[in-house]
Image (cartoon, rainbow, N blue to C red):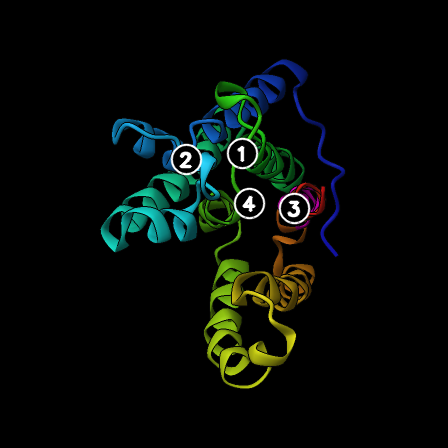
Amino acid sequence: MPDLSATLPPVPTLLVTAAAFLLGSLVSGVLYSRARGADIRDRDLPGGSGTWRQFGRGAAALVTAGDILKGVLAALLARAVVPQGGEALAALVTGAVVAGHCYPAFFGFRGGGGIAPLLGALLVFAPGVLLALLLTAAVVIPTYKATLQARLKLNAVPFTTAVAVPVGLLVGALTGGFWPLLAGGVVMAVRAAHLLRLERA
């Protein structure tokens, strides 16, 4: 299990964590939908799936790429400013960029689910973990749709996330990348619980 014993310089760490949150707060789905004269959050979540449902495949690809990119940029900024940060910094920055996407400061703290910026941050901080997540999703999604979805009546994305994250954590514990995935996963779990409560309210 990787440790978090690295001593982080407080001011640069605070700055890159805040910058990651603000980058996360630039929710591509909200920006895109507002450019189209609407706010997607009035009808759907502002991630790639919601954008696909509301605006089509091309818009979804653009929005997903934008949200992945901000995770990449947050991670690259952290690496540049605090190169000695290790997994401690990776966990802080990953959690912050995902939190910004889920609870964006620029859009009334109403954002998406956090998957795309998490993938972007992991692309820099833990590419092996990212590969494990993607391979698991590639197996689970079609299998789930063909077997369990009709009975469970649950969207494939949350089901796949529930399977893929533990696999990714195991890979991260063995190879590195455990803490950034855990940090992003915890934020996503909080957001998912929040969304579920809002649906039932």
Q: Distance between the residues labelled 3 and 2?
A: 28 Å
Please tell me which residue is depicted at 43% across the width and 34% down the height of the picture.
76
Percent position of residue 193, x then y: 71, 46
Single out the mark in the foreground, 1 or 3: 3
**Position of 116 relative to 7 (above/below):** below
Residue beneath disc 3: 199
Single out the mark in the foreground, 4 or 3: 3
Dot 3 or dot 2: first in sequence order is 2
Based on the picture, tell me whether residue 12 belongs to the magenta stretch.
no
Q: Nearer the viewer, residue 181 or 159?
A: 159
Percent position of residue 159, x then y: 61, 67
**Position of 10 relative to 46 (above/below):** above
Q: Nearer the viewer, residue 155 or 14?
A: 155
Please tell me which residue is depicted at 54% across the width and 44% down the height of the picture.
114
Based on the picture, tell me whether residue 190 belongs to the magenta stretch.
yes
Dot 4 or dot 3: first in sequence order is 4
Residue type, label 4: Gly
Q: Specify the segment rendered in magenta.
A: 182-192
Q: Is mark 3 on a helix, strand or loop?
A: helix
Q: Residue furthest bottom?
A: 147
Residue beneath disc 2: 70
Given contact means CB atoms under 8 Å apart, are the residues at marks 1 and 2 in contact?
Answer: yes
Q: What element carries label 2?
A: helix
Q: How far apart are marks 1 and 4 (CA)?
A: 12 Å
Q: How far apart are marks 1 and 3 (CA)?
A: 25 Å
Dot 1 or dot 3: first in sequence order is 1
Q: How far apart are marks 2 and 4 (CA)?
A: 15 Å
Residue type, label 3: Glu
Q: Nearer the viewer, residue 16 or 52?
A: 52
